[in-house]
Image: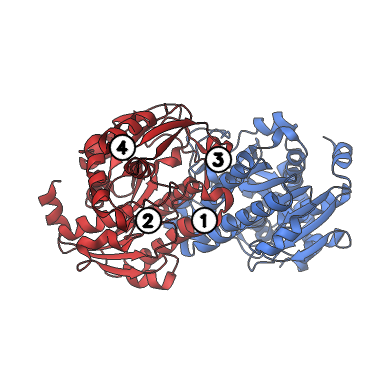
Chain colours: A blue, B red
Amino acid sequence: MDHNQLQTYYSGKKALITGGLGFIGSNLAIKLVTLGAEVTIVDVLWPDHGGNLFNIEPVKKDAQVNICDVRDECAMRTLVKGKDFIFHLAGQCSHVLGQSDPYPDIDINIHGTAIIMEAVKKNAPEAVTVYSSTRGVYGSVDKLPVNEETPTDPKGLYELSNLTAEKLIKFYGDVHGLKVVNLRLSNIYGERSQMLHSKFGVVNWFIRLAMMDETITVFGDGKIMRDFLYIDDCVNAFLRTGASGTAYGETFNVGNDQHTTILELVNVILKVVGSGKSRFTPFSKERAAQEPGDFYPDISKIRQAVSWEPLISLEDGLLRTTEYYRRYQKEYW
Amino acid sequence: MDHNQLQTYYSGKKALITGGLGFIGSNLAIKLVTLGAEVTIVDVLWPDHGGNLFNIEPVKKDAQVNICDVRDECAMRTLVKGKDFIFHLAGQCSHVLGQSDPYPDIDINIHGTAIIMEAVKKNAPEAVTVYSSTRGVYGSVDKLPVNEETPTDPKGLYELSNLTAEKLIKFYGDVHGLKVVNLRLSNIYGERSQMLHSKFGVVNWFIRLAMMDETITVFGDGKIMRDFLYIDDCVNAFLRTGASGTAYGETFNVGNDQHTTILELVNVILKVVGSGKSRFTPFSKERAAQEPGDFYPDISKIRQAVSWEPLISLEDGLLRTTEYYRRYQKEYW
C-alpha cells in the first residue's frame, strides 16, 4: 500500500487514538489526518510520559482532542462509538517503574486495555483495534533474529503487562470475534518523543545529550545488539496492519532487520548531531536483571502479510529527528 | 517428608493463608494447625466463591480468621508482618466469568497478587510465598504429558490472570530476591469445595449431582482426558514445596499422572456414590473456544525436587469426599 492506496482506504474513516498526544500516537494522528481520516485523540497527559499538546500542532484544527484516562470506563464507551479504528497506544511506558511500583503497569496497561476492549465489544464491534506492544515480551532469547513463534519471557512488569494486554486483546478476537492486531514494537525513535528523561525512548535521549554536547552513558561494553526503527516506518506498520483483513487476529514484530550495537548507534548519533561524547559504565544490579541481551526481530511475517518494511535508514532517521528538535527544542526541554 | 518431618518443619511457624476459608485454603489451614503452625486466614467470603466458615470448623479455635479483601493494601501490609509463609490462594476462580466481565480476573488475581507481593517485599522479605496457579495456563497442548517447559497459551482471562500472577510472583523472586513457588494445579477435588454451582470444581459438582440422584451432563463425547487430584495430595504439595529451599523460584505442576477420561470419571462417581445418571450434550460455542482438549501433567519435576507424588487413588478420594458431604450436606447446599 502506497500513500494513494492508504488514502483511498482511510479517507473518511473514523479513528480513535489512545495515547494520541504521545510520541507514536501523535505521529499516527498527523498521518491519518493527511490521509483524510477523522481523528479523535484520547490522552490524559500522564505525568512523566510523552503526552504533549505541541505534538499535534500540524493537525490541531483537524484532530479532536479528548483529555481523559483510558481507565474511565464510561468515557471510553462513548468515545469508541462509531469508530472504524481504535489505535490503542496509551500506557505506562517506563521499563523500570514496576520495580518500585507495580500498580500502574497492572492498572493502566492491563485493566485499561480491558476497558478499551469491553467498550469496543459493546459499542464498536466492527472496529479494528491495533495495539502497540513491545519486543520486550520476548525477554532474553537464544536465537536471532527473533520471530513471533519465539516463546515469550518478559523480564519486568512493563513487559509482562504488555504481554498480558496482548493476550487479553487476542481473547477478544478469538472469543468475541473482534478484529484485533498486536504489534510488538522494537526501539522506535524520531520526532515528537518526550526528551525530558531517559526512562523510555533511549535513542531520542541520546540525541538530546549529543545536541547539548553532553556525555552519553553506554552500559556494559556497548556490544549489545538492537534494532532501531524510525517513527514514520512505525506509523506505516499501524496503518497497513489496520487496513488489511489478513492481519486481523495476528501478532507481528515491527522493527528493523538492520541491527546495530548500542555503541555503533551512539557513534552514528555523535556524527549526525555533530556534538556530544560517550563513556562506558557498568550495569546496575536492577538493570542487569531486566536486561534481555541481544535482540533483533525477524520481520518476515509482517512483510509477507502487508508488504511492510522499514524504508528509512538509521542515519536518515537520526538526521530528521535532530532537525526537528533543533527547530522545536523549546517545546520539549 | 513424612508427617513427622513436616511437623518438625512447620511447628511454631507462622502462616498466612489467603482464601483460607475456601476449598484448598481451609484444608491447608487444618493441616497446618495439626502440624503445630500458627495460622492466620484471610478471606473476604466473595459471593459465589468457595469461602465457607464451616470449612474450618475443626480448627476454629486455633486458626485466626481475618475477613478482608486481598486488594486491601493496608490490611495486607499488616497481615504479612512476622509471617514465615504466605500461601496465596485467594482469587476469582470462575473459568468463564471473564467472557462477560474481565475485571475480577484482572483486579483480584493480578492486582491482588501484586498487593500481596508488595506487602511481602516490604514487611516479610524472608517469608516463603506459595501461589496456587492453574494447569489452564498451558491452554491446548500438542504433547502429553505436559511438563513445565511447555509454552503457555492460556485460553481465557481466568487462565491468563493466573499466568500473569505467576510471572509477577517470579519477578519478585528474580528481581527482589523473595522466596516464591508457583504451583500449577490440575483438577482438585475433595472435602470442603463449594457445592452450590458448577462454575468451578467439576468433580465435586458431579458428586453432588450423583448424591441427589440427578443427571451429570457430559460435554462432547466425554473422551477428553484429564487428571484429578485429591485435596490431601494437593495440600501436601503446598507444604513440601513451601518447606524446601530447592523449590524456591520454581514453578511446578501439581496433578495426577494417573489420567482418565471425563466419562470414566463420571462412571466411577456414579459407582462410588451409588446413585445418579449421565447424559451427553454438545459443547456451546463459548465453551468450545475455551476448551483446551486433552490434558495430563508430567509431575517428574516436583517428584524430583521435593519427593511429592499423589498417594490417594481416584476411587478412595471420591469415597472420602462423598462421605464428608453425606455427613455435612446442610453446610454446603
- Looking at the rendering, which quadrant does residue A11 occupy? top right
Subunit bearing disc 3: A
Query: Considering only vertical position in the picture, is A112 above or below B241?
Result: below
State the CA–CA distance, disc 2 to disc 4.
25 Å
Which mark is first along the chain, 4 or 2?
2
Check disc 1 and give the amino acid type.
Ile
Badge nearest the viewer, 2 or 4: 4
Q: Secondary structure at mark 3?
A: loop
Please indicate whether residue A327 sits to the left or right of residue B64 in the image.
right
Q: CA distance from mark 3 to mark 2?
A: 45 Å
Residue, disc 1: B106
Host chain of mark 1 = B
Residue topped by disc 4: B275
Q: CA distance from mark 1 to mark 3?
A: 30 Å
Q: Nearer the viewer, residue B297 or A94?
A: B297
Instruction: Where is residue B27? Give x, y as percent.
Output: 26, 54
Label 3 belongs to which residue?
A: A295
